[in-house]
Amino acid sequence: EKSWELFRVNGYEETKIERITKEVGISKGSFYTYFKTKEDVLFSILEKIEIEIENLLKKINVSKEPSKILYEFLERRMELFLKYVRNMKLENLYIMKSGQIDKFKNRINVLYTTFIKDSIMKKYENEKVWNSEIISKYINSSIESYFFQEIFENKGIDEDFENRSKKAIKEFTKFIDSALK
């Protein structure tokens, strides 16, 4: 957790192993007992985030009507997004959008698109009319793009970001629900 905080605030490249060990209060030798490199720490953090996303998706009540499932999915996704990017330097967000952590991003996208396809889209009667794989990917990428665009346009997460996001989630839900009906 301390490593993520340092990466988020100072940047991955700028955060040295010495700084991590100092902040955590361990020796470099102890660090190297668990991790070979700083990159291993990053991948350990990303695995933790992936597990958190999996658990988040399992907690969503998928027996409700699809628009309510979609709304809860979007709301929880935004909360988790904020948990990990709040106070993050913009240049670190650019790194997240770059190819440096593609395997992680791809696994996360599969989790999200699979949830959209299997837990939301299957509930609509028009499912046979569209390619649910393409539509679920489109919905997922649109949502992600919106959040990143909001952050970049406002040069970070300002105090009104959460309110704007909640309004956007309501609009996304209405629009997607209407389109899928």
Image: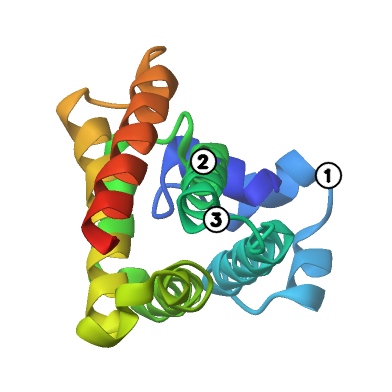
Label 3 vs label 1: CA separation? Answer: 49 Å
| Left or right: 110 as drawn, with respect to 179 | right
Instruction: Please name the amino acid that badge 1 sits on.
Output: Gly
Image coordinates of residue 171 in percent, x first then y, are 29, 35
Question: Of marks 1 and 2, which one's residue comes earlier in the chain?
Answer: 1
Asked whether disc 3 touches disc 1, contact meaning CB atoms under 8 Å apart, the reply is no
Image coordinates of residue 166 in percent, x first then y, are 42, 27
**Residue 25 shows which numbered tag?**
1
Q: Quadrant of residue 60?
A: bottom right
Question: Of marks 2 and 3, which one's residue comes earlier in the chain?
Answer: 3
Image coordinates of residue 89 in percent, x first then y, are 36, 35
User: Label 2: few (<14), some or many (≥20) within 10 Å?
Assistant: some
Picture residue at 81% right of the left edge, 57% below the top: 27
Frontmost residue, 155 versus 9: 155
Q: Nearer the viewer, mark 3 or mark 1?
A: 3
Instruction: Please name the amino acid that badge 2 sits on.
Output: Glu
Frontmost residue, 104 versus 33: 104
**Residue 75 shows which numbered tag?**
2
**Residue 65 shows which numbered tag?**
3
Asked whether disc 2 touches disc 3, contact meaning CB atoms under 8 Å apart, the reply is no
Picture residue at 78% right of the left edge, 75% below the top: 34
User: Label 3: few (<14), some or many (≥20) within 10 Å?
Assistant: few
Q: Quadrant of the C terminus?
A: bottom left
Q: Quadrant of residue 25?
A: top right
Picture residue at 52% right of the left edge, 71% below the top: 39
Picture residue at 48% right of the left edge, 32% below the top: 86
Whether residue 157 is visible: no
Image coordinates of residue 170 in percent, x first then y, are 37, 33
